Image: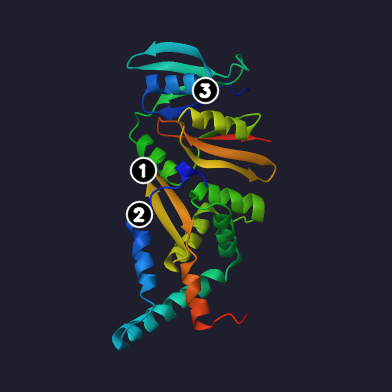
Amino acid sequence: MRITITSVFVDDQDKALAFYTDVLGFVKKEDVPLGEAKWLTVVSPEEPDGTELLLEPDTHPAAGPFKEALVEDGIPFTSFAVDDVHAEFKRLRELGVRFTQEPADMGDVTTAVFDDTCGNLIQIAGR
Amino acid sequence: MPEDAVPRLSGSRSDRSSATAGTTPRCGLDRQVSTYVRSSVVGDVFKALADPTRRAVLDELTDRNGQTLFELCARLTTRHGVGSTRQAISQHLDLLEQAGLVTTSRDGRYKFHFIDTSPLRAVTDRWPVQD
């Protein structure tokens, strides 16, 4: 068994694709029409055959309250690895990304948390 | 301090400031009321400070003011070895807020926690520090 897909619930797939590619720097991998929505995934350019991130519509009625509750408490939905959290923080902030947690040393990792503009907080972590 | 992590302060914070300012009485009735307010506030402050986890919360907010619950929990776990649940930390924060030592402020969909040391003044007003 292998983990090939992970997902985030997004409020708008096109907006999400723009943010996750143009701002975060991922690249589109799959874009398959599925009725009203798409099977839409991105991957890291560093690992084009690595785990895909599915940009999944948050249309289920439970998804909205769930996401809002996480965001209110500052809880990231998922976490991505970066080599240098401070450098990535600086790069993303200059692109207008809103951080709810600036880089902080948490034991043997440094983490930061930002808003993905699609209703989620995302953590970046690095050693 | 991060400029965009410091939200505008909501009414609750200034409400609390004016309540604290009321501890300087100008007439008898004010004095009676303020003595009552002061003693209850000081009691809350002592209770709030009596717990090591709550003191650690104040340490971390001193290190960086304006934190989400998530950041506070992560700091308490990784820096202080606190194994409490998020719910338990939330209850600690409620108690600190009741004592006036922590204020919360909403900024859009986010909620941040701030330290407010002004209630500590009631302690030294009552028992002045001898230099």
Residue position marked by numbered label 1 in the rendering: B108
Give the answer, above or below, for where A28 lies relative to A99.
above
Give the answer, above or below, for where A60 lies relative to A20.
below
Q: Secondary structure at mark 1?
A: loop
Name the amino acid type tagged 3.
Answer: Leu
Which of labels 1 and 3 is toward the front?
A: 1
Q: State whether discs 1 and 2 lie on one chain.
A: yes
Q: State whether discs 2 and 3 lie on one chain.
A: no
B87 or B106, which lies in front?
B106
Residue position marked by numbered label 3 in the rendering: A53
Question: How packed is label 2: few (under 14 Cα within 10 Å), some, or many (20 or more)?
Answer: few
In percent of the image, x 39 and y 22: which residue is there? Answer: A15
Residue position marked by numbered label 2 in the rendering: B10
Measured as percent of width and height from the top left, residue A118 is found at: 40, 30
Residue B37 sits in quarter: bottom left
Q: Can residue A119 be seen? A: yes
B80 or B123, which lies in front?
B123
Question: How packed is label 3: few (under 14 Cα within 10 Å), some, or many (20 or more)?
Answer: many
Measured as percent of width and height from the top left, residue B44 is found at: 47, 73
* 3D distance between C-alphas at marks 1 and 2: 12 Å
A119 or B131, which lies in front?
B131
Measured as percent of width and height from the top left, residue B108 is found at: 36, 43
Which of labels 1 and 2 is toward the front?
A: 2
Residue A36 sits in quarter: top left
Instruction: Say left or right for B77 vs B7.
Output: right
Q: Chain of mark 3?
A: A
Name the amino acid type tagged 2.
Answer: Ser
**Circle nearer the N terminus (1, 2):** 2
Instruction: Say left or right for B66 vs A15.
Output: right
